[in-house]
Amino acid sequence: MADNNGVPRRKPVPHSAQELPENWAQELTAQFRRTLSTKRMNELSSRSPSQRRPSSRRVPTDIVVERRRRDIASPPPLPPSRQAPPPPPPPAAVPETPAEPSNTSTAESSDIAADSPPAYASLKNIPAVPTAPTDQFSRRFRNYLINLSSTPVTWENPGLLDEALRVVPLQRIYDEAQEEADLLTAEAASLGDNILPAWGYQDCVIRALMKWFRRDFFEWVNNPKCSACRSPTIARGRAAPLPDEAARGANRVELYQCAHPQCQSYERFARYNDAFVLLQTRQGRVGEWATCFGMLCRALGSRIRWVWNQEDHVWTEVYSVHRKRWVHVDSCEEAWDAPRLYTEGWGKKLSYCIAFSADGCCDVTRRYVRNPATHSVPRNKVTEGELLHIIREINALRRKDMDKKQKFQLNAEDMREDAELRKYIIEALAFNVSRILPGGDGEKASMRGLDTATMAAAAARRERRGGASGDADAAKAAEHARGAAGDAERVRRAGNTTVGEQRPPGSNGQSPPRREHHRRA
Ligand SMILES: [Zn+2]
């Protein structure tokens, strides 16, 4: 259970109640906050200034650290200030407004479609050669992606992240996380020696955060209720932002009218995309949810990605240090590591899923579209070579001020992820082949099983070759088998749809009701 990611662990609980000092819990919370903050500070201050979000409220690192030190002697932090947050940065990406380039003119589209390979081929393992976007159409898409890529960068602000933590019930989240982590450890121990828990402590922290965020903090809004009489409202189009709405970064405001005949008052619903403003408004649709939740994950010390999908959805991914991979997290659905939710769960077809972080960008479509034959739609915005070029351009932009070591680590991570994503396609092909072979029973061939078998076979091959990495691979395969077993066990016990990815959520009656946000962003 030793997560070596520097996340604070809970102090051992004193044996008897008498030993507990009165302010024990408060002190502990303050300690968590400080440790987290220091960790984040260290991370962020090692970045170059150009990577940080410009803000009038940002104070030099040494001053922040000094303040931390003084905090040690000061009482627990005050409740979140009711003050309006500072004016947001220059308009960042608009999460779910498909204000994407108006490039759907049929003539242009068909030109591009003729050039680009069909959807299935585009998701195969054909290495694309990066080519710079040349025509106006693909350059527009490039600019659109570059604009989107700045979203998670705006969260990299130590002062504001500290401020954000004040609204989070840290004590409760850490307690819940510790409880789950302990359970997973016990479960792993019961499965045999050398079996690691399915998830690490920091993963459990994010899971607990997500639960609190969805159930107690953020509100889903389709039509806002009338603030005068709480009656339902009817959409009446758009309105121009008021000065205070504009100052907080609302670039569009939806107008609603109360349906009650005696009331009929108007209700405004400003669409904010500044995560720190959303901490105050605490409401919205999928874009607001992903933005605010993503920022809070960052505040709690995780590496975070904001995933944009061309079919009008956004979600997040969190890096699991324990599993050494990016994990799908959708706060609207309380879905954890369930990347097949959208395709196999909801029956959606997806073209592009692009993940953006403060460190770069990755085309993660293959994680979400496991079977391109059934769940992909043509990718015709740019050619695959152009997309690769754009992604490399964004990576270079985000990494330009990093030192060699950091860049090397990120490149290695990119390669690992690419191998992971390629593996999904191989699994899909194997799965499809197993279904058409005489006597083959594709339904029973669990993807997890294939996955584990593939890894174990690879490990055995390496061992036969006598490579030094044999042990590591064998351990990895064992760990993976353990993960699958652990997940299956937990699913069996808890009937929890968010644990494993082997079963599409929504396939039983226990999954949370699906929100209608796919229709209305
Ligand atoms: Zn009313």
Image (cartoon, grey):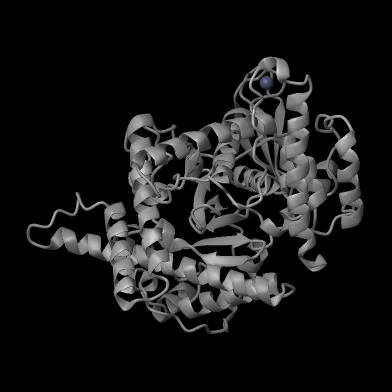
Q: Kindly identify the residue that appears in the image at 68 percent across and 77 percent down.
A: 404
Quarter of image, res 29:
top right
Is residue 215 rendered to the left or right of residue 155? left
Quarter of image, res 408:
bottom right
Question: Depth check: 310 or 175 in front?
Answer: 175
Q: Is residue 320 visible?
A: yes
Q: Kindly identify the residue that appears in the image at 61 percent across and 28 percent down.
A: 216
Looking at the image, residue 449 lies above or below residue 470: above
Q: Kindly identify the residue that appears in the image at 39 percent across and 44 percent down.
A: 500
Counting every numbered tag in the picture gives 0
Question: Depth check: 521 or 175 in front?
Answer: 175
Task: Estimate the x, y position of residue 344 in percent, counting from the top left.
Answer: 34, 49
Quarter of image, res 151:
bottom right
Looking at the image, residue 408 lies above or below residue 262: below
Q: Is residue 351 visible?
A: no
Task: Estimate the x, y position of residue 370 in percent, counting from the top left.
Answer: 35, 58
* Quarter of the image where the C terminus is located: top right
Looking at the image, residue 457 lies above or below residue 349: below
Question: Depth check: 174 or 391 in front?
Answer: 174
Is residue 421 rendered to the left or right of residue 132? left
Task: Estimate the x, y position of residue 123 in percent, counting from the top left.
Answer: 38, 69
Is residue 483 rendered to the left or right of residue 46? left
Q: Kindly identify the residue that appears in the image at 64 percent across and 73 percent down.
A: 407
Task: Estimate the x, y position of residue 320 in percent, counting from the top left.
Answer: 54, 52
Find ligand 1 in the image and state its quadrant.
top right
